Every structure is written in C-alpha cells, then in structure tokens.
Image: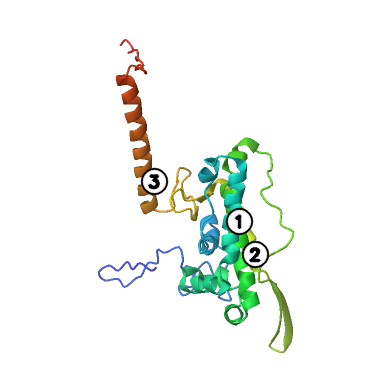
Amino acid sequence: MVAKNEKLGKGARRFTSKQIDSKNHHRSVTQGADGASERPSKPYERLRPWLEIANLLPPPPLRDELKRSPNVLVSILRVDQWEAELCNLPPAEIFRRFTRSRSAHEAAIVAGLDVQLLRTDEEQARRFRQLIGQIATTLRALAAAALPLEAAGEMPLMIMRLYENPATSRSEIWVRNGFVDTSWVDPFKDFLTALAGVEAARVRQCAVCAHFFFALRKDQKACSKRCNGVRRVRDWRANQAQHEYRRKLREAGLLTRKKTRRRRS
C-alpha cells in the first residue's frame, strides 16, 4: 500500500508502507533480489496459512469437553471417533475444500504441493488428507498442553514424537538452463519450520467453533469477534444460573450471605 504526500508546488511522493523498499519502490521488502518471497518474520504470519489448512477438517474435541467426560475411557473414545471421522472423509472432498479456501492461494502452502497431481492421483490426494490430519493432530496436542506447560516451567516438555512423515513428500529432478537441479519437497517439514519459535501458549482452539487460531493477546479465548460474543453470552448465562441458584438457597435459609467489614477512614 502506497501513501502519497503531495503538497502545493511539490510533486513529491512519500512511501509510508513498510512493504516497500525505499530504494526500489516496485519490490516488497519481504522479497529477495530475485523476486522470491522470504520467510515471514512474525510468528503469526508464518503460522497462519497452516492454521487455516488444519481448519479445513472437522474440528477435534475441545480440552474442556474431554475434561467433562465421565472417565478417561470416554475421552479416549471421543478422540478416536474424531480420528476415524478424518479417515472416513473422502480425499476428494478435502481437496475440494482446499481449492475453495484461501489456503490454495498461499505461497507457503502451494510451494510444496503439486496441485495438478493431487487433482488426478487418488493416492496423492489420500496422502494430502493424511498431511492435513497430522498438522491438525500436532496443533491439537499443542492447544491441549496449556496446563502441562505451566507445570513444567522452564523444563523442556515433549509434545509429540513422529516416526513417519505423512505428507506428499517427494524428490524432484529438473533441468534448468542445461544443468541438473534436484530438490526434496516436504510440506510437513515446511509446517514444522513455520511452527518453530512460536510461543506454545498462543496456539489455541476456539472455545466456540473449536477451530485453531493464533492468540494475538494472551487473554484471547476465541478466534473472532463473533465467537467471542457467543462465549461471553454463554459465560453470562452460566453465571446468572449460579447466582439464581444461590439466591434460592439464601431464601430457603440454607446459605447465609457473607458480611463484609468496612474499613474505617
């Protein structure tokens, strides 16, 4: 975005956007000399495309929902049910959601994917579904690790160990200007690179829609203003029911109101 600062008698233009290099007004400072996009420096911008691609799947159960389960077995069955739901979701449906989402236009996502191959090869589409499922599983483990992280303090805490990389990983061999060029493409490694250095407590699940989001504020409990409004109404109603219950107990003489002592001035 470019802002003009034109005064009478002067035709000078002042570029105030941080995305414009002062020496080269046509190139963003987030691009290299060859025009290739560099890795975003802010954790939120780096992780945002991967959060969006994980939200293409059915949301996993919330931590509070699992805590309200009658026992641990019910919680395990609820997580297994979510994982089974992911496996039963057709790969073609996942790819359709991807192509209609904003993630399909994100350079950080598309750079490591062969979109044409995903469209025509069913096996590659299945591996793509597996990739997104592993990303969602990793984010769910991080979002559920708030209390263990507080208890661990400065001690390192292992969240997950992966022995297999479920992604559309592949090797590519090209001939560029007469010379052989090789590369190893691994979208899940790109996700781990974006995740590295992110403050763990900021990766959360929305208390209303259960989607993953990056908490820009430490007291942020919902992914959007709409969900936050729903959450506040729910909390207000829950508090009102508790106040009404305590009022009835006081009227029945089963609960006495605590007297507060006033300070003498």
Q: Look at mark 1 in the image and give the residue it sits on.
A: 137
Across and down, in percent, residue 251 comes to 29, 20
**In the image, what residue occupies the spot 39% across and 51% down?**
227
Across and down, in percent, residue 74 comes to 58, 45
Mark closer to the chain start, 1 or 2: 1
**In the image, what residue occupies the spot 54% across and 54% down?**
60
Q: Look at mark 3 in the image and give the residue it sits on.
A: 231
Marks 3 & 1, CB-CB < 8 Å contact: no
Vertical side of 180 occupied by 169: above or below: above
Q: Nearer the viewer, residue 2 or 88?
A: 88
Q: Identify the image quadrant of the C terminus.
A: top left
Q: Is residue 220 left or right of residue 261?
A: right
Q: Amino acid at mark 2?
A: Phe
**Residue 198 seen from this side:** no
Vertical side of 155 occupied by 182: above or below: below
Q: Amino acid at mark 3?
A: Arg
Label disc, if present, on residue 188 of the rendered structure: 2
